[in-house]
Amino acid sequence: MQIDIAIDKTLRAGKRSFRLQVRFRCDEQRVVVFGPSGSGKSLTLKAIAGLMQPDRGHVRLNGSTFFDSRAAVNLPPQARRVAYLFQDYALFPHLTVRQNIAFGLTRGWLNPSAHARHEAVEYWLEAFRLQQQADHYPDELSGGQRQRTALARALVVQPRALLLDEPFAALDAGLRTEMRAELAALQERLGVPMILITHDPDDAEAFGDAIIRLRDGRLATGQAQRSAMLSDSREQ
């Protein structure tokens, strides 16, 4: 994955303001954006997904320009073809597991039929061991099953990259370790490029082919002086 990010964004709320200034380039398949709460991780991920528009800069992935303020380019989220996995998974409570996964394939506002069968949906139900839960609703699932459902919904559209917002934060310690291993194996098997944000050093250790460290909206001290901010977790 080739990713080239240069983001400058100022947010204001009353007398308070926060400025995000992030610039990095890398060619790794698994990129971790790491830092404490309030460091700008989620804003960076939203800028890549098209859910937040920077004031200036550019966002490029695998040779495609998603955003460029100078060239007046700002692709809508659906045109970027990246899958965004929210921290709370954002499953639809009134839809079954099968319908939630199929929702990624639908167009318009109609919910997928509860009785319809789609080859891609059935593939991901099997891949994530969710066949027995296919007709269950999100409130009937365990934390791990909800996460696998959200991942299946993200991957069913064959995205260019998978963006994950603190994917293990809502899980207990035992399940967190299990789901890290599952996600790592899945990413390696599918070869889907992944950008993951986290405040957990164990996540960074598990997934960080490249680690981008943020603090107060900027690259952490020692990284800001280089254009390519790459730090393998094994070297830290």
Image (spheres, rainbow, N blue to C red):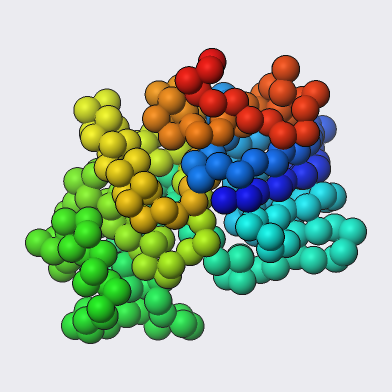
Residue 79 position (above or below residue 161): below
Viewer-side residue, 123 vs 109: 123
**97 relative position to 183: left or right:** left
Q: Residue furthest left?
A: 132
**83 relative position to 75: left or right:** left
Name the residue rendered at 43%, 25% in the picture: 205
Name the residue rendered at 77%, 27% in the picture: 226
Asked which quadrant contains residue 229, the reply is top right
| Residue 69 visible in rendering | yes
Residue 108 position (above or below residue 158): below
* Residue 116 image offset from top left, x and y in percent: 23, 84
Residue 49 position (above or below residue 7): below
* Residue 102 image offset from top left, x and y in percent: 33, 73
* Residue 86 image offset from top left, x and y in percent: 45, 50
| Residue 94 visible in rendering | no
Asked which quadrant contains residue 173, the reply is top left
Viewer-side residue, 140 vs 157: 157
Viewer-side residue, 110 vs 3: 3
Name the residue rendered at 32%, 80% in the picture: 112
